Image: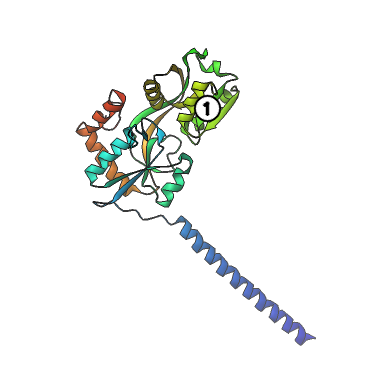
Amino acid sequence: MKKRLAMVLALSMVSVSLLAGCGKQESGADEKKDDKKTESKAYEEKKVGDTFTVGFDQDFPPMGFVGDDGEYTGFDLELAQEVCERLELEFVPKPIAWDSKDAELESGGIDCIWNGFTMNGREDNYTWSDPYLNNKQVFVVRENSGIDSEKDLEGKVVDVQTDSSAQAALEDNQELTATFGNLQVIPDYNTGFMELESGAADAVAMDIVVASYQIEKRDAAFKILDKEIAAEEYGIGFAKGNEALRDQVQKALEEMAADGTMAKISEKWFGEDITMIGK
């Protein structure tokens, strides 16, 4: 009996030892997996002749859109093209679905997001250029709607673009949005303006830079309410950790600000220089 008991105990100790060994191996494998997940990509500067792919929303005039000639154009795209000329890179504008912008950037499908891209609230999600434009979120309504303040939006239908800073600002202001009849999330602001014109929506929450341009170009009977939903700044968003490319672009932008090129492009699109870099 003593011999049998000794053998059982010995076998038990061997089993425990083997299980412990397996546990260590699995833990080590998990650590390696975690290391791979946290391992940052190595980014390098662009070289002469390389492509520079800019991700943008093609329904976001005047920052980026399809012109009457069928070509991509806009304030941001013109800035980006000038940067490419100075860095001797091939400019590639790539329209993207706004809610897939992060996936495009992470996969390398685009080199940056440059399209009236709000920095506020996203500071830690990207490697940013310096801000180059001030902006604010506002409400656009029909002139004859009888809506003169945010209080008049009670019970009304308000449109906002999906995954936009206006949407984020409104979701943070539940006291206001709770008074709306409905907050409708739409794919783009062209849809919003069409719904505003048809009466399907009573207001559109959006960037004042875009709103002012749209009202002027459409020659429509719209107005911007004095209510400021949120103040913000536009920047160029690069993949987290891609300081190499960010620094190249930032240097070119500073040169453009210093020699007056940036002001000239701003005056073309907005009638005045509203840029921030170098000021």
* Residue 195 in the image, given as x and y percentages of width and height: 51, 25
Q: Is residue 115 above or below residue 30?
A: above
Task: Evaluate whether residue 121 shows in this view.
Answer: yes
For image coordinates 72% across by 79% down, the residue present is: 9
- For disc 1, the marked residue is 159
* Residue 121 in the image, given as x and y percentages of width and height: 46, 36
* Residue 4 in the image, given as x and y percentages of width and height: 76, 85
151 left or right of 64 in image: right
Quarter where residue 190 is shown: top left
Q: Is residue 106 above or below residue 57?
A: below
| Number of marks present in the image shown | 1
**Disc 1 packing (10 Å; few <14; some 14–19; many ≥20):** many
For image coordinates 37% across by 35% down, the residue present is: 66
17 left or right of 226 in image: right
Q: Amino acid at mark 1?
A: Asp
227 left or right of 155 in image: left
Q: Is residue 269 above or below residue 148?
A: below
Quadrant containing the C terminus is top left
Q: Nearer the viewer, residue 85 or 138?
A: 85
For image coordinates 31% across by 53% down, the residue present is: 44
Secondary structure category for the residue under label 1: strand
Task: Evaluate whether residue 174 shows in this view.
Answer: no
